[in-house]
Image (spheres, helix red, strand yellow):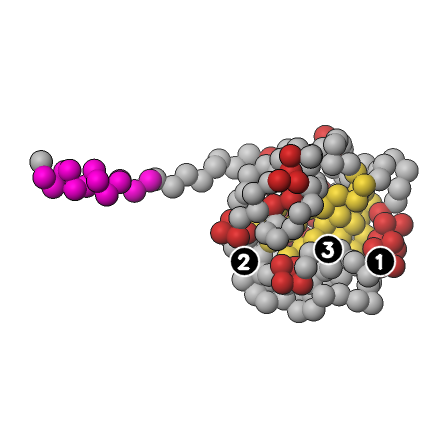
Amino acid sequence: MAQAWLPGASRLPSPEDSGRMYGGAPRAVWFIWPADPHGVSARSVAQRLIQLKRPSHLVWNPVAGEIVQLLPPMRAASGLPPERGRNGRVCVQIRVIGSTHEPFTDTKLDGLDEILAWLDSWDVPRRWPAGPPLPFPHSLAAERSARLWARGGHYGHSQVPGECEGDPGSIDITRIVGDVPPEFALPHPREDFRLLERVI
């Protein structure tokens, strides 16, 4: 059963959010908060996000394993424009303390299993429809497909339609969603070949 608050996470409830969810495919979006995870706590970042009136659902320090939750997933966080952040039954926004230049998936990832189990309980599919996020700064010009966004699953901030940010940079998505084989669609035969077959 899905719980509004991630078990084991510290809570720092935000007095503001971006409204109710619209419904649709559930998803999670991974952001970077640019700071050294060896020296900056998740709680201090969460406090700063509240001050800026841009709360995420979770702030995670993957080196220390510290997780702070600011909002329940039934309410939209404020890291995306409301028209995107309210897409889905849930659209869990996760701020990871780290760098766009050094993949956070190269660290210990303490606390990741707990985050993923919680996302599973909210039916966020363990897939990454847009593929691995591009490395920074190439990610600034990444394709942001509305069709892939509509599928639900996990996305980097750089893959959200309408956004122009480049985080989280290059990360190893298999450390988050597992080693899932790509989904291939068989191409339809071209119309001119079908016409040729009828003539023959």
Magenta stretch, residue numbers:
187-199
Mark 1 neighbour density, 10 Å: few (under 14) some (14–19) many (20 or more): few
184 in relation to 29, above or below: above
Q: Amino acid at mark 1?
A: Leu
Q: Amino acid at mark 2?
A: Ala
Q: Is residue 64 visible?
A: no
Q: Secondary structure at mark 1?
A: loop
Task: Report the Cα–Cα distance between label 3 and label 1.
Answer: 11 Å
Helix, strand or loop for the magenta stretch, by majority: helix
Q: Residue at x 70, y 42 (%)?
A: 167
Q: 73 above or below 137? A: below
Provide residue 2's location: percent of width, then percent of height: 64, 60
Q: Residue at label 3?
A: 79
On screen, residue 112 versus residue 43, left or right, reads: left
Quarter holding the N terminus is: bottom right
Q: Residue at the location (63% across, 63% down)?
A: 83
Determine the secondary structure under disc 2: loop
x%, y% of residue 76?
A: 69, 63
Residues at badges 1 and 2 in contact (C-beta under 8 Å)?
no
> Can you give x and y, in whole percent of width and height, for residue 66 in the image?
82, 45
The image quadrant where one finds the C terminus is top left
Query: Which quarter of the picture shows residue 63?
Result: top right
Q: Residue 22 occupies which quadrant of the picture?
A: bottom right
| Mark 3 vs 2, N-terminal side | 2
> Which residue position is annotated with label 1?
52
